[in-house]
Amino acid sequence: MTSYSSRPPPERRRRPWLIALPLAVVVLLAALWTGFWFYAANRADLEITQWRTREAQNGRIFTCSRQDIGGYPFRLEVHCADPNAQLRSWQPPVGLAAKDSLVTVQVYDPTLVIGEFTGPLTIAEPGRPASMVANWTLAQASLRGRPSAPERLSVVLDNGKFAQGDGGTLTNIANAEHLELHGRLTGGSANNNPVVELGLRLTNGTAPVLQVLSQPTDGVMSATVYGLKDLAPKPWREQLRELARGDGRIEIEQAKFTQGDMAAIGTGTLTVKPSGRLDGQIRLTVTGLERLIALLGLDQAVAQYVAQRTGGMTVDKLASGLDRLMPGLGGAVRGQSGANLAAAGISMLGEQTQLDGRRAVALPLRFADGAVFLGPIAVGQVPPLF
């Protein structure tokens, strides 16, 4: 007969340090991360100070009424109250001032900088009333790379409003429900012959001072700029002057704008001559051409040109010719004049095609030493850009 002992099994000795070890590791890691964050924050403050010093030596003064650094534990947030920039090296000198800015960097990815800005933004020469005022409900910018070696820059603006000042009086010049600007470095470097790819997206944009943009307009554009010397902050006229000296060019891969039932898409290349005037050609495809001509105020000029080229052809004869070219096209101008007649005349000079499933006409938009031609017809003059 088998007997079993009634003695209980020996108790296992508890090891409290096994319970405390994970907690100790977490506390140690938190302490190390906290030390690293404060080191990074101090380093960021030093970098900002050094950057301001370098910029000041080049005549560009950047200040805040108050600056704070926060964002612990995973971000660095640089808050600047009343940001102000004095570009004294520009001719004429220019000052920019906003209400607030917040720049954020992820500690684990310092090559991505995101900024948010509070308007209004005022632009003025020192001691003079604002020459430009901009405001918005949201303004954000993101920079990939380092400030001294940027790779990509994007700016997004919601409900932007732009006004031009004249002796203290502000006049609205442009509005946009949504605006995006993108720039990407595709060749060279920021300090040596950069090649820059540009992109634009516009939603419900208007510019009351320009008849052609007096109605809400949507648009997208992509282009590449060759011939820049560098990307140092400077007036855009100086950038264009350097572009002309460097035999630069602007290659427009695609530009499409729509306004109501009118749409236009263009591709081509433009250059800036040493005189500051535009040269080049864009292949333009347009639907609703009669509306574009009316907006540009070209009714009479185009009608006169067509009459000269057709030996005084009457509207009915012109309509019959259009019907032979494309059945039904003559009905658009029979018994009419002005923009419809002008559009019909240009349609005969251009190439019939389609855009977004609609009837369209394609023809060159040429810039010759500042003069602008739509097909063979002179439609205006662009003043020197600098």
Image (spheres, grey):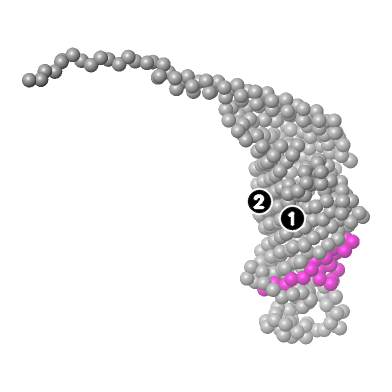
Q: Which residue is the site of mark 2? A: 177
- Is residue 57 something that shows in the picture? yes
Q: Is residue 366 above or below residue 386?
A: below
Residue 317 point in image, percent of width and height: 78, 85
Residue 313 image label: none
> Measuring 67% from the left and 81% from the top, which residue is drawn there?
328
Q: Which residue is the site of mark 1? A: 223
Residue 215 point in image, percent of width and height: 70, 59
> Measuring 66% from the left and 64% from the top, which residue is drawn there?
260
Classify mark 2: helix, strand or loop: strand
Classify mark 1: helix, strand or loop: strand
Q: Residue furthest toward the left?
A: 1
The residue nearer to you, when weighing 83 against 69, is 69
- Is residue 131 something that shows in the picture? no
Q: Quadrant of the N terminus?
A: top left
Q: Amino acid at mark 1?
A: Ala
Q: Is residue 375 magenta?
A: yes
Q: Amino acid at mark 2?
A: Glu
The residue nearer to you, when weighing 299 against 275, is 275
Looking at the rendering, the stretch of residues picked out in magenta corresponds to 359-380
